[in-house]
Amino acid sequence: MSVKVMIKRKVPDGKKADILPLIIKLRRMATSQPGYICGETLVNADDKSEYVVISTWNDLDSWRDWRLSAQRIKIDEELEALSEVTTEYNAYFYGDIYLYQKLK
C-alpha cells in the first residue's frame, strides 16, 4: 500500500543557503531508491522558516529502507546540525484505502 511521508524542518534564516542544497541532494538520491514515486518541497506561507518535504513511496518498507540507509543518515545528520529544532517525520497511508482494507 502506498504511503506519503511528511518531513518538517525549521530552517534558520542564516542557514537556508546551506540547507537547501542538502534537501535537493536527498531528493535526487531518493529518486533512485526502490519504491520511490515522487516528492516535493513546500515552504510555509506564514512561517518562511518551516519547510515540509512530502514524498510518495510504493510501501512503508521502501521508505523505511531509505530512511535508515547510511547515505541518507549522513546527509540527515548535516541537516540536523543546521536546523533549529529536531526534524519531524510522519508517514501516512491513504485513509479510504487503508480503512477499506482493514474492514475486509
Image (cartoon, rainbow, N blue to C red):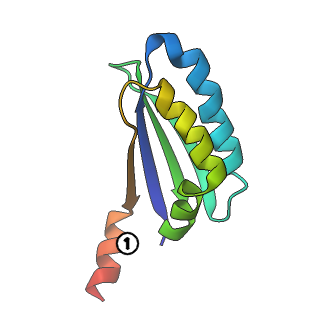
Q: Position of residue 31 (x, y in %)?
A: 69, 51
Q: Quadrant of the C terminus?
A: bottom left
With 8 as the anchor, is 102 left or right in this view? left
- Give above or below for 49 relative to 80: above
Local secondary structure at mark 1: helix
Q: Position of residue 25 (x, y in %)?
A: 68, 37
Q: Is residue 73 visible?
A: yes
User: Which residue reaches farthest top?
Assistant: 14
- The residue sitting at 59% across, 34% down in the picture is 23
- The residue sitting at 42% across, 32% down in the picture is 9
- The residue sitting at 53% across, 38% down in the picture is 77
With 34 as the anchor, is 52 left or right in this view? left
Q: Position of residue 28 (x, y in %)?
A: 70, 43
- Give above or below for 21 relative to 67: above
* Depth check, front residue: 57 or 22: 22
Residue under numbered circle 1: 97
- Give above or below for 60 relative to 78: below
User: Which residue reaches farthest left?
Assistant: 103
Say few, some or many: other residues with alpha carbon within 10 Å of mark 1 (under 14 / 14 to 19 / 20 or more): few
Q: Is residue 59 visible?
A: no
Q: Position of residue 18 (x, y in %)?
A: 60, 20
With 1 as the anchor, is 21 left or right in this view? right
User: Which residue reaches farthest right?
Assistant: 32
Amino acid type of the residue that numbered disc 1 sits on in the rendered structure: Ile
**Figure disc tally:** 1
